[in-house]
């Protein structure tokens, strides 16, 4: 399985290098590290499923999807992964996305670990950096004091409206701490959440001056 995981890594590197800095391969590496921390407290989890799902989880992200790239299914099949394992991995991948609060139901500890690991990388100092990296890549405003924050929206509404980067904190990032599933994920999210709150308070003070 180690060979399959290494070959999977090589397969995805050329895809992620086309993405902006908010979703590049460095993001995948950080999510893997987060998953490792959580897995150390969840011994029943299938580590191979988690590692492969993390490597593949942004390949078909709606923000970056291209028909020119192979799908997760294509890659796993080419690597000779068994069909029942492929199904489990793909189900985990589908459960990761926030989708404006319309995420899929988590039905396994593997799915919970992957979702928490990914969301940890969306908050804290790195989450702040990624938010502005993505906003810059999409030409979005840093902030808009008149922009309405939406807490209830469809997945389509969430993806279609190009909100200012600071608005994104209120529509998603500040919500993630309370959406963590695993005990370790909840613990790790606390410090990162607190840092974001301090950052936004300081930003508001500077904007008001």
Image (spheres, grey):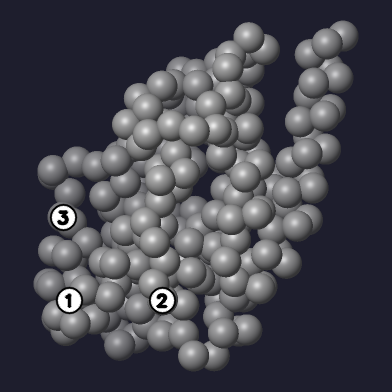
Residue 13: horizontal and vertical position, in percent?
33, 57
Label 2: how many Cα within 10 Å (few below 14, some 14–19, many 20+): few
Instruction: Tell me if I can see residue 7 in this picture.
Output: no
Residue 31: horizontal and vertical position, in percent?
51, 62
User: Label 3 belongs to which residue?
Assistant: 70
Secondary structure, mark 1, is loop
Point out the frontmost of discs 2 and 1: 2
Residue 108 is tagged as: 2
What residue do we see at 66% from left, 42% from top? Answer: 174
**Along the horizontal axis of the image, is 122 left or right of 186?**
left
Measure how far apart labels 3 and 2 are at the Cα level.
26 Å
Task: Report the front residue among 142 and 27.
Answer: 142
Question: Contact, CB < 8 Å: mark 2 with mark 1?
Answer: no
- Quadrant in the picture for the C terminus: top right
Measure how far apart labels 1 and 3 are at the Cα level.
12 Å
Residue 207 is tagged as: none
């Amino acid at each position: 399985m180690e060979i399959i995981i290494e070959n999977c890594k090589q397969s995805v590197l050329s895809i992620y290098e086309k993405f902006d800095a908010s979703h590049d391969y460095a993001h995948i590496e950080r999510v893997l590290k987060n998953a490792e921390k959580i897995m150390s407290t969840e011994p029943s989890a299938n580590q191979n499923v988690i590692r492969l799902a993390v490597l593949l989880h942004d390949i078909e992200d709606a923000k970056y999807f291209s028909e020119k790239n192979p799908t997760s299914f294509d890659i796993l099949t080419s690597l000779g992964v068994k069909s029942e394992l492929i199904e489990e991995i793909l189900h985990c991948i589908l459960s990761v996305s926030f989708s404006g609060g319309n995420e899929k139901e988590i039905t396994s500890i593997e799915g919970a670990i992957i979702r928490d690991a990914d969301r940890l990388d969306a908050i804290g100092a790195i989450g702040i950096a990624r938010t502005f990296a993505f906003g810059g890549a999409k030409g979005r405003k840093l902030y808009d004091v008149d922009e309405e924050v939406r807490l209830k929206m469809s997945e389509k509404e969430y993806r279609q409206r190009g909100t200012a980067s600071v608005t994104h904190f209120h529509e998603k990032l500040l919500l993630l701490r309370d959406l963590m599933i695993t005990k370790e994920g909840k613990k790790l999210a606390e410090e990162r959440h607190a840092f974001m709150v301090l950052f936004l308070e300081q930003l508001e003070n500077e904007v008001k001056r």
